[in-house]
Image (cartoon, grey):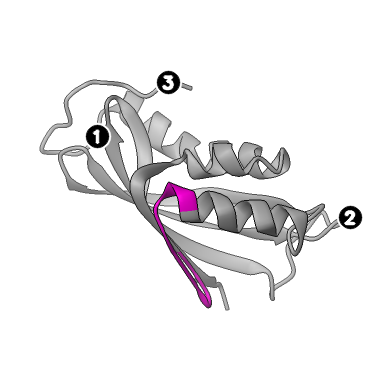
């Protein structure tokens, strides 16, 4: 899905932008399903930040390296799931997206309570494309 280049209003992003924002988790799911560290890192702005429990990565290069190692190791054979809970406008061209989901181990079809997470995504519209400036998740329970 392509992002709208329409100008945000004081009321928040346009309907087209809201759809493009809500599609970012689906793009992450697809990148993860392909175990494609490049596609995963490209969801972020160049100097984006990813924070996971015990992990802090700054910039696409570090995020790409972390995910490539993860797909070859800890995350090998896993899938990720998630869906938006809320989109909250922050400023023109910037939103907070709240999601819930988690990592499915090989063969799993449902998240365990230990694997379930909630996440905060700070997205910015950069050249008509919604990208992650900051992604942070924590255990749901």
Helix, strand or loop at mark 2: loop
Residue holding disc 1: 13
Q: Is residue 123 magenta?
A: no
Residue 129 in view in this figure: yes
Q: CA distance from mark 3 to mark 2?
A: 32 Å
Q: CA distance from mark 3 to mark 1?
A: 15 Å
In the image shown, does 32 or 118 lie closer to the viewer? 32
Disc ID at residue 107: 2
Q: Residues within 10 Å of mark 3 (few under 14, many from 20)?
A: few
Where's residue 59, x and y in %? Answer: 39, 52
In the image shown, does 13 or 94 lie closer to the viewer? 94
Where's residue 99, x and y in %? Answer: 48, 55
Question: Mark 3 or 1 closer to N-term?
Answer: 3
Magenta segment boundaries in residue numbering: 51-61
Helix, strand or loop at mark 3: loop
In the image shown, does 73 or 99 lie closer to the viewer? 73
Please tell me in which quadrant of the rendered image residue 104 appears: bottom right
Residue at point 65% right, 51% down?
Answer: 68
Residue holding disc 3: 2
């Amino acid at each position: 899905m392509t992002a709208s280049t329409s100008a945000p209003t004081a009321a928040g992003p346009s309907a087209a932008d809201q759809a493009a924002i809500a599609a970012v988790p689906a793009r992450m799911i697809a990148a993860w399903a392909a175990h494609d560290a490049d596609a995963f890192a490209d969801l972020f702005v160049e100097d984006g930040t990813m924070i996971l429990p015990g992990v802090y990565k700054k910039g696409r290069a570090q995020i790409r390296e972390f995910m490539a190692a993860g797909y070859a190791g800890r995350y090998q054979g896993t899938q990720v799931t998630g869906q938006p809970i809320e989109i909250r406008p922050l400023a023109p061209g910037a939103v907070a997206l709240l999601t819930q989901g988690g990592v499915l181990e090989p063969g799993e079809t449902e998240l365990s309570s230990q694997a379930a997470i909630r996440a905060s995504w700070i997205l910015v519209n950069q050249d008509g494309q919604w990208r992650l400036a900051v992604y942070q998740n924590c255990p749901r329970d």
